Image (cartoon, helix red, strand yellow):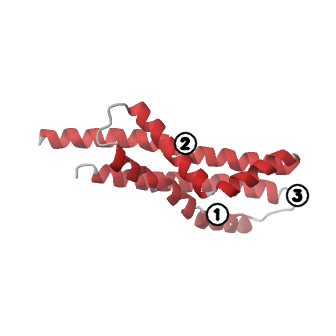
Amino acid sequence: MWRLIPLFRMTLRMFFYSAAVFTVAHGLIHILFVYKESGLSATEALGIMLNIARWSVTPALVLALPLPLVTALCFREIRRPLFYRFAMMSVALVATITVWANDYAALGHGLRLGGDVAGYAAAIIASNAVAVYMSVIVAGKYVRDASERRQRLEKS
């Protein structure tokens, strides 16, 4: 029961971190690749960013929800934090590849085409990799939160 609050914090952190990464990275990529020759006003750019922020809720949930589930089921006590962070990154990567396998296949095809399409595909893959890497940061914070909470409860 003492792990409930750290697990909830982990879920919220992963959701907000990955949503922020998706929004900023995909918004900038979209603006840079789609509107590179034509001009873009500030209100249009803001509208694009807001639409991408709305879109980023689903990928952020895909990254955020498996982490506490796997932690609750498989990691009762974390003795090796480095392994735990690696496991959480693996969980996030597997969840992403499972949900968007066809999209990654299309991005791979775009890489083979070359030119601007390859640059766009590489930028999308890199931004998704940064969002998956957020799971390592969130897992480290969970380890710290859980150990602090457990120590406080043991002192009481």
The residue that appears at 34% across and 49% down in the rendered structure is 73
Q: Give the x, y percent position of residue 62.
A: 52, 58
Q: Give the x, y percent position of residue 66.
A: 45, 53
Cα–Cα gap, marks 2 and 3? 32 Å
Q: Secondary structure at mark 1?
A: helix
> Looking at numbered disc 1 in the image, what kind of residue is underneath it?
Ile
The residue that appears at 27% across and 49% down in the rendered structure is 3
Q: Is residue 77 above or below residue 123?
A: above
Q: Secondary structure at mark 2?
A: helix
In front here: 15 or 43?
A: 15
Disc number at residue 37?
Answer: 3
Residue at far left of view: 156
> Looking at numbered disc 3 in the image, what kind of residue is underneath it?
Glu
The residue that appears at 68% across and 68% down in the rendered structure is 47
> Looking at numbered disc 2 in the image, what kind of residue is underneath it?
Tyr
Decide: marks 2, 1 in contact (CB < 8 A)? no
Decide: marks 2, 3 in contact (CB < 8 A)? no
Compare marks 2 and 1 and give the one earlier in the sequence: 1
Disc number at residue 52?
Answer: 1
